[in-house]
Image (cartoon, rainbow, N blue to C red):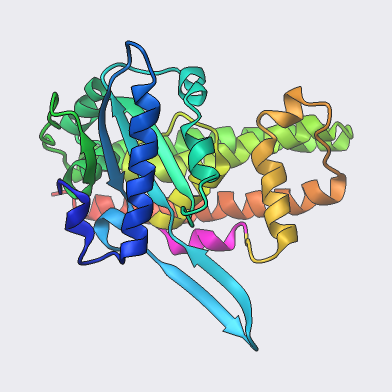
Amino acid sequence: MKTSLQDLTKTLPPDKIRELDIVKEIIVKRFERIKGEPKLEKIILFGSYASGKWVEDRSVKNGRIISEYRSDFDILVVTQKGMSESNWLDLCIEDEIDNHSEIQREVNIIHHNIHFLNERITESYYFFTDIAQEGILLYGSGRYELATPGPVTPALQARKSQEDLDYWMDKGNKFLKGFRFYLKEQDYKEAAFLLHQATESYYAGIILVFTGYKPKGHNLKWLNNQAISIDICFREVFPMQSKEEKDLFQLLKKAYIDARYKKGYSINISELNYLSERVCILGKMAKEICEEEINRLKTMID
C-alpha cells in the first residue's frame, strides 16, 4: 500500500489532491466528535484514483456539453470496532461531503472494522487484496497494520464465482417475477421496490464474481459505479445524459426506502416500464460478462 497523498502527485492534478484532502479532514473531524468507540483507524483511497485508471470524459458539440463522465472517489473507512448503519449515518459524513463546494465529484464510502478487513485480506478476497496492494493510505492511527493476502487458486475463484452468480441471478429473476405481478395489480410502489431488489441482486452477482465482495448498503448509485469500473459496457444500462434519465434512475434508487415507507413516493406505469427494460438488460449483461470471467478462470486451472 502506498502511504500518503504525496504518492499521487505524479498521477493526479493539485485540484483532485485538494478534494481528497478535504474528504480526509471531514472524516477525521467527524470521528473526533465521538466520545468513546469506535475509533478511526484508517482512511484508504482505492479504485480508479488509487490505481491511476481514473477517467474524465467530456463530449462537446457546438459549444454544448453532450455527455460527461467522471470517475468517483472510492474511500474505505476502517474503524477499530464495527459500526451499525444507523450509527454511521448519525456521523453525517456523506452529507457534509456532498454539500462541500470544493468537492466536484461523487465520493463513495464503505466502512469496515479492522478485524473484518484483515480476515478478508488473509482469505484473499480480491476486492480487499486489491485495496491492500493498490490503496493509498490517506490517514492511519498507527495502531494496526493490514494483513498479508493468503494464497488463492483459479479453481477456488471459479467455484465461488459460479456459486455467487447462480445465487444472485436466481434472486434477481425472482424479484422480477414479483415486480411483474404487482405491476399487473397496479400496486406501483410495491412493484418499484421489487424492481430495486432485482437491480441490486444483479449488481451483487457482478461484483461478487469479479471481487468476491458484496457491499452492505443498498445504494444503486454506488453499485452501478462499481459495475462500470469492472466493465465499461455497464454504462449502457442506465444512461445518464439527460435530466429525465437521471431522474428515472433516482426514482429506482429511492425505491428501497421511499416506495415502502414514504407516502409521497410516486411512480407511474410508463416510468416502471422504462426502468424494467433497463433492469432486464442489466440481468442479461450480468450473466454474459460474468460467465465470460468464470470461463476465463476455468482455463487457468491446471
> Can the viewer see residue 68?
yes
* 185 relative to 41 in the view: left or right: right
Over which residues does the magenta segment extend?
231-238
Whether 124 is among the magenta residues is no
In the image, 248 versus 136, the foreground residue is 136
- Which residue occupies 64% across, 49% down? 279
Residue at point 77%, 34% (across, down) = 191
Residue 162 visible in the snapshot: no
* Residue located farthest toward the top when viewing the structure as drawn: 36
On screen, residue 242 above or below 47? below
**Residue 280 against residue 93 in the figure, above or below:** below
Q: Is 230 left, or right, of 243 in this rendering?
A: left
Q: Quadrant of the N terminus?
A: top left
Q: Report the residue that reaches farthest toward the bottom.
A: 62
Q: How many marks?
A: 0
Could you tell me what secondary structure mostly forms the magenta stretch?
A: helix
Above or below, comparing residue 219 to residue 83 in the picture: below
- Which corner quadrant of the image does residue 124 belong to? top left
Across and down, in percent, residue 151 comes to: 11, 37
